[in-house]
Image (cartoon, rainbow, N blue to C red):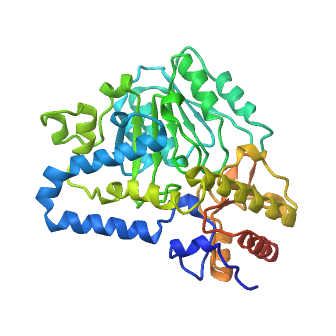
Amino acid sequence: MQRPEPSPFAELWGLDSECVFLNHGSFGATPLAVREEQQRWQNRLENEPVHFFEELMPTFLQDTREALATFLHCKSEDLALVENATTGVNTILRSLEFQEGDEILVPDHAYQACRNTIDYVANRWNAMVKIVKIPFPIGNKGIVLQNILDCVTERTVLAMIDTVTSPTGLRMPFEEITRELESRGIEVLLDAAHGIGMVPLSLDELGASYTTSNCHKWLCAPKGTAFLHVRKDKQDKIHPLTISHGMTFPLGDTTRFRHEFDWTGTRDVTGHCSIPMAIDFLGSRVEGGWPAIMKRNHELAIIGRNILCESLGITPPCPDDMITCIATLPLPSGNSSGGIPLHEPDPLHRELKEKYGIQIPVWSWPSPEGRYIRISAQLYNSEEQYVYLSQALKELL
């Protein structure tokens, strides 16, 4: 089979022309111009490192917070810049104090790295982890909300909720979940690793106690860039994982929350400094800006999913309104996991890459047990790439 062409937008990225890249969801991909922007920042830093860190960096990081605040409809002083969403989740969970018997809610579709953090923290405090069962396939988003509320007790103090689940690609009704839980006095930690640039986020209106999101994924900023949003009334109890000079430096016109997160030791902040340009760059390449980008990617993901479902005889496992820019599908052939441990790659992943040049995640999932693939849709992808994937799968399965 002849490998398909990506979309015309692909020229902005410089991806390997021999690879049919359908896995933006794992680590993202940064456009060439944004990579060049980071290089300019790195050159500026290295030209005079002391001046950069001591005199210029606070202003540059504030510029980034302002750009993110505009994008996220929130206040810049409520934002901290971290390296990734997993760091954001760890920062919150390891800052909070729990009482013995306190309950932490987490759906069973949560990202494993973050679930590991919950288990670690709960064990330290003798707290309880309550797993919310979410079916997959699923008929409607109301099932998610109801299952979560059914697990709430008088001991529930915190819930970690995804915007979009990593393994199953479900757009959670996180707005309704947040509203219901926070109104009951239960803090919500929103794991929006798949968030900014993928789904609209209005953080002040949303009202979650804590939100963290990767900028290197759907915002297409450099690697090692993410944000943590902490509601004003929660900031006194949240501290970075690394305690450094920010704890004692004179505040000036800033807050202790911002100061602590800006000064966590020497680190490369050039990725964060590149975020405003990343927002403007892609937003200016599509008429209608970021809302149009999110809409286009959402529609392409549905098209790709429908192509695969029709070709392989698969029933879509969720309605269209629970899909964003990624979609997970069960594989046919009895849908057996073949004894592959959870969260380990399936050999089919290697076959698709080596024989067809397709980069796409394949894994086992226990509910129901089977083998699953997850497609992504970004500006550089084309409809023909999903047709090619369906043909490759028909030959291999």
User: Is the residue 98 above or below the residue 52 in the image?
Assistant: above
Q: Which of 366 and 55 is in front in this view?
A: 55
Relative to 71, is 141 on the left or the right? right
Which residue is at the far front? 287
Q: Establish if 237 lies above or below 367.
A: above
Q: Is residue 117 visible?
A: yes
Q: Which of the image's four quarters has the C terminus? A: bottom right
Judge left or right: residue 150 versus residue 127: right
Residue 342 appearing in the image: no
- In this rendered view, identify the residue nearer to me: 98 or 253: 253
The quarter in which the N terminus is drawn is bottom right
Taking the spot 20% from the left edge, 50% from the top edge, the residue there is: 265
x, y (%) of residue 239? 29, 34
Residue at the extreme bottom of the image, as rendered:
2
> Which one is nearer the viewer's eye here, 130 or 304?
304
Residue drawn where x is 29% and y is 68% of the image: 40
Q: Residue at x 37, y 26 (%)?
A: 232
Q: Which residue is drawn at 68% across and 29% down?
A: 145
Residue extending furthest top?
154
Please give the count of numbered marks on the rendered protein.
0
**Which quadrant holds residue 47?**
bottom left
Could you tell me residue 180's position as x and y percent?
61, 22
Q: Position of residue 125 (x, y in %)?
A: 40, 27
Q: Position of residue 306 (x, y in %)?
A: 81, 59
**Front residue (pair 5, 186):** 5
